[in-house]
Image: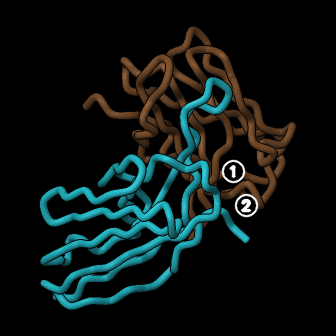
Amino acid sequence: DTGVSQDPRHKITKRGQNVTFRCDPISEHNRLYWYRQTLGQGPEFLTYFQNEAQLEKSRLLSDRFSAERPKGSFSTLEIQRTEQGDSAMYLCASSPGGEGGTGELFFGEGSRLTVL
Amino acid sequence: QKEVEQDPGPLSVPEGAIVSLNCTYSNSAFQYFMWYRQYSRKGPELLMYTYSSGNKEDGRFTAQVDKSSKYISLFIRDSQPSDSATYLCAMSAKWNKAAGNKLTFGGGTRVLVKP
């Protein structure tokens, strides 16, 4: 399967613990996005990478959140000192292209976080 | 007020009926319009993509965009129980280096097709 891969699919943690999610985009895609989706809501943008450069961060991404994409391949999203309000599905998406682009994003299956 | 509004449903229809979904938006910069289907506890799957105003048909699916009214629609003909899912509209402005093709989503409409 050459789609977007996310790991783990589900993480249960206690409040205050740190968690890390990994995303492997479609291999030829140089753009990578993280979104967060809470129950009954649409996905909300968190951050965007063009290759290894993190170019935009949403105000939703507090200082407890950090995302990286070393070497422009896979990406990680770390949440430090988790809070119950962090419980959500964290979605990774990728898209191809250099300049320009059509806006078609391809999503992974998501990593669901439950903070107890 | 949200940039993209979508009725949460649920929308219940009998098998074989036409499912009609829509979204309204406020940002006139949006140029690319998409519909995603999301099954429970799964990631969104791209169904339809449309650039600017107009219609697009793909099998049982028809997407319509009316930029003058800031209104987009998705029609599903001959609906099947397997079409039961949440349908998300999404849109983006013209690509820019800073934000790429950042999508803004509606809240999703839950659809139930009854056998």
Local packing at callout 1 (Cα closer than 10 Å; few below 14, some 14-19, many 20+) is some
Which residue extends farthest front? B68
Residue bearing the label numbered 1? A13
> Which is more toward the observer, A59 or B75?
B75
Q: Secondary structure at mark 1?
A: strand
The amino acid type of the residue labelled 1 equals Thr
Q: Position of residue B96 (x, y in %)?
A: 61, 29
Q: Is residue A92 above or below residue B23?
A: above
Chain in brown in the render? A
> Which is more toward the observer, A39 or B67?
B67
Q: Residue at x 52, y 39 (%)?
A: A92
Q: Are marks 1 and 2 in contact (CB under 8 Å)?
A: yes
Q: Residue at x 39, y 56 (%)?
A: B53
Q: Is residue B27 visible?
A: yes
Q: Secondary structure at mark 2?
A: loop
Marks 1 and 2, how far apart at CA: 6 Å
Which comes sooner in the sequence, label 1 or label 2?
1
Quadrant (top left, top right, bottom left, bottom right) of the C terminus of chain B = bottom left
Left or right of A69 in this view: B20? left
Q: Position of residue B11 (x, y in %)?
A: 38, 86
Residue bearing the label numbered 2? A116
Q: Position of residue A93 (x, y in %)?
A: 48, 38
Q: Looking at the picture, do discs 1 and 2 lie on one chain?
A: yes
| Rendered colour, chain B | cyan
Q: Position of residue A41 (x, y in %)?
A: 59, 67
Q: Is residue B6 above or below residue A69?
A: below
The amino acid type of the residue labelled 2 equals Leu
Which residue extends farthest top? A71
Disc 2 is attached to a residue of which chain?
A
Q: Is residue B43 visible?
A: no
Q: Is residue A76 above or below residue B58?
A: above
Q: Residue at x 56, y 15 (%)?
A: A51
